[in-house]
Amino acid sequence: MTDTVPVVDTDANLDEVPQDKTIDRRWFLARTAAIAAGTTAAAWLPEAASAAPVPLGAHPFAYARNVRPDARGDLTELTIAEAAELIRTGRLSPVTLTEAYLDRIDKYEDIYLAFNHLKSRSELLAEARALGRKRGKPHPLHGISFAPKDNYYTHDMPTTANSPIFLGFVPDYDATCIARLRDEDAIMLGKAQMGALASGRGVIPGTNIPTNRNAWTPDDIRYNPAGSSSGTGTAVAARLATGGIGTQTGGSITGPSVAENLTGMAPTFGRTSLYGVIPLTYTVDRTGPMARDAKDCAIILQALAGPDRNDPRTRGLPPVPDFVTAATPVTRGRKVVPRYRTTVGVPPDFLTVSDAQQVALRRTMLGVLADIGYRVVDVTMPDEWNLLVGDLAETQHASGAHYFMPWLKQDVRLFGPRLDGFLPFVLRSGPGLLKLQQANLILLKRIVEQLFAQCDVTFVNAGNFNRPGLPTISMPIGFGTDNTTGLTVPRGVVLGGAPFGEQRLLSVVAAYQAVTDFHLRRPPDPTLPTLAATTTATARATAALSAAGATSFGGGSALRQHTLAENAKHPVSNTFDPDEA
Amino acid sequence: MAVTPPTRAELEAIARSTFALLDIDISVLPVNDPAAPMDQARIIEASINILAKEPILAAYEVDGQADATTLYPTPFLEWTR
């Protein structure tokens, strides 16, 4: 175990089963039948009900018992659990924490460009001071700084989805996810940059000039922060915010999380509300946390999850279980052990990727999981897998295309480089779309009955699990060389689980992070250019933006203009990638 | 007798006609400019790919009783268990 684990659980009931085991009887029967037929291993029967959540404010594992020295020296290093502990014990105030982030934003945001909109210093400090006057025991998110993606409605800030379509749009209410975070006293610093309309990499509206940089390559725009929750990823990794929430239709939470060395989760469809989120599709979109480790991810998810009267897709589903405990590493003596007995599936292509560095990192990671006590097995993919995740894998963009019909009719140029992710889908026939939806259900059943008959969690391509509504989580596993730029960048993997398998996914990542420190490493600060370099930047940036047809994003400091001028030298590919949605 | 599959030009015509039917004007885009944020060529290419998948979808046989069409597969599985 590393010395940096802030809190462990030494009294866990190892016979407890997470919620995924109690959900679908057909899956459970299939799994136990497979185990009985194919192995001599004991069938892992549910012996204790999955724990109900303890209210966040009283949760013993939501607060770190010790705070890492690095984080005490730089408050922007604090995880949510660490900051919560300092605030709970009166050693840190929301004002001081907010000021630390504002100072860092003042210094570096004009290079990162992680935000589409930032509230003013005076507004944010007023919010923080108001929290400081509240009575009662502070909850774990009390005074915690957030960078929500710019497609969540906020009543007090513009919500643009980084598209000219919504330029200047200020909703008159908060998205349910925003409201729930604010109910827990979280502070929304601003709205984070994103791929336009939740697809692809963030670009300046109307152009193919990239905006936010990857926090790990702050001096080089070439390395992709991935999309579409790219600004949230950069903000959390670059220590411009402690936590964030993104949205995922293909891989838009887990992709940027992998690219930025974060732990991000797209929970089971319906676990979190979509009310007040600008849709990409009605059927596949997901809201979820992007954080620095599994514990922070769980704390955010605990605040977000649950039925919402405004979103019928969240209703009639299993009760919200205890994610925070699930994300607390369990020890016996000094050894980290699995919280739940879990078989980790390794798909056939997982160790055959072309990048030898990636293969080595993955092998090492599998060894770590086995050392913890997880059973690691090769798995075969379900029947018709290549067809179901190939030709039948369209991400239901037809529903999004019809949502955006008024703007398609108004002017297709409003969609910029993302137009090909919308307009062509109006051509999908009604029967064709219904067939795709049936194929999604078949994909779900095959994963549940065939893949999860062999394992409890498995490494996945996020899009293949996202389409039928299954939960996924990313976790950092090391660093490697990007073949295109030669830069050293984070590497990670995505784990997928059974329906309502968030507890198990969080538990596996938390255990892995208890014995590794990749998730704790922080990227270098950007190099601030000299004044001379910025003196001519405004003219160059203006010319570049004008030439590229930008419809907004002008103005700002000389440093911002310098950044834009540099970014304009590296326009992004226009290819629509459904995994970046 | 085998049906002659539509030509690329015919598929392009379907796409352009549908856009026009829906009152969507793609003529405001450059015809073919890879450096532009978007052009007509890319829209037509993506559109033909969408249309070309229709026969694949039509040919995929499903059990309409067991695998009902559902917008939300995971909640559906839970609601119906």
Image (cartoon, helix red, strand yellow):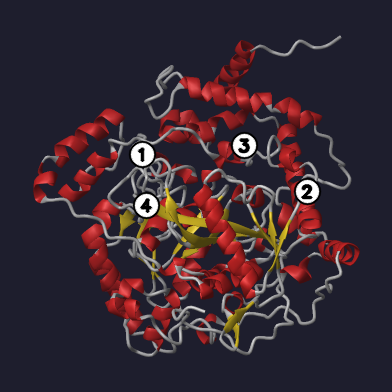
Distance, label 3 to label 1, CA atoms, is 23 Å
Mark 2 vs mark 3, foreground winner is 2
Which chain is mark 2 on?
A
- Residue A557 versus residue A108 in the image, above or below: above
Query: What residue does disc 3 label?
Result: A398
Identify the image quadrant of residue B21. top right
- Would you call the spot at circle 4 few (<14 residues within 10 Å), some (14-19), or many (20 or more)? many
Q: Earlier in the sequence, mark 3 or mark 1?
A: 1
CB contact under 8 Å: marks 1 and 2? no
Query: What residue does disc 2 label?
Result: A382
**SS type, badge 2:** loop
Residue A497 point in image, percent of width and height: 67, 61
- Amino acid at the residue labelled 3: Ala
Distance, label 2 to label 3, CA atoms, is 27 Å
- Would you call the spot at circle 2 few (<14 residues within 10 Å), some (14-19), or many (20 or more)? some
- Residue A30 seen in the figure: yes
Which chain is mark 1 on?
A
Query: What residue does disc 1 label?
Result: A205
Residue A356 point in image, percent of width and height: 52, 48
Q: Earlier in the sequence, mark 4 or mark 3?
A: 4
Mark 1 vs mark 2, foreground winner is 2
Q: Nearer the viewer, residue B40 or A517?
A: A517
In the picture, which quadrant includes the N terminus of chain B?
top right
Distance, label 4 to label 3, CA atoms, is 31 Å
Q: Which numbered tag is attached to residue A214?
A: 4
Q: Which numbered tag is attached to residue A193?
A: none
- Amino acid at the residue labelled 1: Pro
Residue A344 point in image, percent of width and height: 68, 63
Q: Are marks 4 and 3 on the same chain?
A: yes
- Would you call the spot at circle 3 few (<14 residues within 10 Å), some (14-19), or many (20 or more)? many
**SS type, badge 1:** loop
- Residue A306 seen in the figure: no
